[in-house]
Amino acid sequence: MYYIIASHGEYAVACKKSCEMITGAAPQFSVVTFTEEMTKESVENAYREIIAEKGEEQCLAIISDIKGGTPYNAAITIRHEYPTIALVSGLCLGMMIALNIGDTLESAIEQSREIITGEGVSAAKQPKEAVGSAEPVENNGIVNFRLDERLIHGQVATYWTRTLGVTRIMIVDNDILSDEISKKALQAAVPSGIRLSVLSVASAARKLNKGAYTGQRVFLIVRRTNIIRELLEAGVKVKEVNIGNMGVKNGRKQIFKSVYCTKEEIKDIQDIEKSGVLVYAQMVPNDDKKKFTSFIN
């Protein structure tokens, strides 16, 4: 029997090493490391390779670091392909130690819930984070328009939504509408208390243009440059577009950290700028905004 453990960066690798320091060899843990240049599809393929090598029947669970992160979202797809494999979030050293000494997955999860304790911790309320300066354009409610191929993932779910004070995440993608697995993954990843819309280009443009989201704070996310262009051509009003993540794929070259583009995608972005919309690169809210064309001119 084995478990696949997955995380952003080297966290899962470090957890396994720490577990081995305490309990000895841990061959039952196969590690998947998610890096910035990877796509959700490449994480899915990493899971499939391990399962093909070690067997579906022997895999008890995929354990990811956080719910809604790309390793978790990719595992949702795998779980639909291999329904006997469980999916767990909250990877931590305590959970791994319990599993490595022979406890069941259910017991390890319960034990990990009891690990966090604190002494001298104030019960004072945490101050609210300041809402970002982005304001809705006209009456469409959009506070940020972002291209991110991972759609709703860790940075979006836990950082951007809080910083922007988001009340609705809107995913615009014609293909996802007919993909039930992808829609379920998005529903699982959206943060509690935030509404989710998954719309076609035509439907999103129609609703935004007629002011259906007036008074809301809409975080509009797409995964292709042509969708940005099509929304603008359909009359959606925005002042700027954020290019956040475009992963490594055939025909793409690196433009800057975490962004790879084909010639056609670069042309889309240049056309968007020519229409009067600023296109900038910003991975997380505390990064500086950098004009996209400064990297390609």
Image (cartoon, helix red, strand yellow):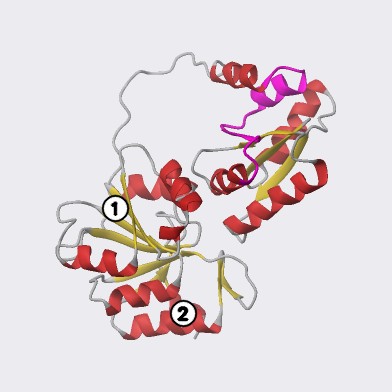
Q: Which amino acid lies under the numbered mark 1 shown in the image of this protein?
A: Gly
- Counting residues from the start of the chain, the first of labels 2 and 1 encountered is 1
Binning the other alpha carbons within 10 Å of mark 2 as few (below 14), some (14 to 19) or many (20 upward) gives few
Q: CA distance from mark 2 to mark 1?
A: 24 Å
Query: Which span of residues is magenta-colored?
Result: 81-104
Locate residue 95, reporting x and y percent: 65, 24
Please say if 139 is above or below 117: below
Rendered residue at 41%/84% (across/down) = 270
Rendered residue at 54%/84% (across/down) = 263
Label annotation for residue 132: 1
Residue 90 appears anywhere in the view: yes
Binning the other alpha carbons within 10 Å of mark 1 as few (below 14), some (14 to 19) or many (20 upward) gives some
Please say if 97 is above or below 119: below
Q: Which residue is mark 2?
A: 294
Give the image quarter of residue 269: bottom left
Rendered residue at 68%/48% (across/down) = 33
Q: Is residue 27 left or right of residue 219?
A: right
Of helix, strand and loop, which one carries label 2? helix
Give the image quarter of residue 101: top right
